[in-house]
Image (cartoon, rainbow, N blue to C red):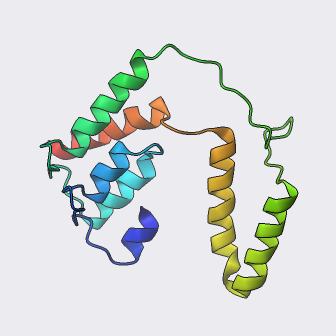
């Protein structure tokens, strides 16, 4: 979200369903506090609602309740991680990374960092982290006061 806001988009713009970037972040699989903080810095209004009448706080609370009601599962380790939880790329992924470096040249450092971060997040299966959602709920509640 921080990257998109850096492009100059309106932090309160809406999709066809009335969803702001803040609402989309709260509804998504990888809701993170730093995205919420970026939106707040850009002037995102946490009180805006989508077509259903829900705010980002409503969605974050619903997600948190759902996550807390689930029975905890032991996380499965991804085959992409070694014994130290470091990412090991398959040959086709290594080839893709090399292609990106060639095509992007000197400007590739940031794109490669973002790609690597997202690939590592996927391998570690860091989706819908209850701790992050709890922090988002607290941040949105504080912003609404």
| Image quarter (top left, top right, bottom left or bottom right) of the N terminus | bottom left
Q: Position of residue 127 (x, y in %)?
A: 53, 39
Q: Total label count?
A: 0
Q: Which image quarter: residue 74?
A: top right
- Up/down of 19 relative to 63, above or below: below
- Up/down of 82 relative to 50, above or below: above
Q: Residue at x 46, y 42 (%)?
A: 29
Q: Is residue 77 left or right of residue 68?
A: right
Q: Nearer the viewer, residue 44 or 69?
A: 69
| Image quarter (top left, top right, bottom left or bottom right) of the C terminus | top left
Q: Position of residue 84 (x, y in %)?
A: 84, 38
Q: Nearer the viewer, residue 3 or 88?
A: 88
- Up/down of 103 relative to 11, above or below: below
Q: Nearer the viewer, residue 142 or 127?
A: 127
Q: Is residue 94 left or right of residue 68?
A: right
Q: Which image quarter: residue 57?
A: top left
Q: Which image quarter: residue 140?
A: top left
Q: Is residue 46 left or right of residue 125?
A: left
Q: Residue at x 77, y 68 (%)?
A: 96
Q: Position of residue 104 (x, y in %)?
A: 69, 83
Q: Is residue 118 left or right of residue 47?
A: right
Q: Residue at x 83, y 63 (%)?
A: 94
Q: Residue at x 41, y 54 (%)?
A: 35
Q: Residue furthest top?
A: 71
């Amino acid at each position: 979200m921080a990257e998109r806001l850096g492009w100059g988009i309106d932090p309160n713009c809406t999709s066809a369903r009335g969803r702001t970037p803040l609402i989309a972040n709260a509804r998504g699989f990888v809701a993170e506090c730093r995205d919420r903080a970026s939106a707040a810095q850009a002037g995102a209004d946490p009180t805006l609602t989508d077509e259903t009448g829900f705010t980002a706080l409503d969605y974050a609370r619903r997600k948190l309740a759902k996550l807390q009601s689930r029975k905890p599962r032991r996380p499965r380790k991804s085959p992409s991680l070694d014994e130290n939880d470091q990412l090991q790329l398959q040959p086709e992924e290594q080839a893709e990374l090399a292609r990106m470096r060639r095509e992007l040249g000197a400007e590739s450092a940031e794109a490669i960092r973002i790609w690597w971060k997202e690939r590592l997040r996927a391998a570690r299966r860091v989706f819908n982290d209850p701790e992050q959602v709890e922090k988002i709920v607290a941040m949105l509640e504080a912003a609404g006061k």
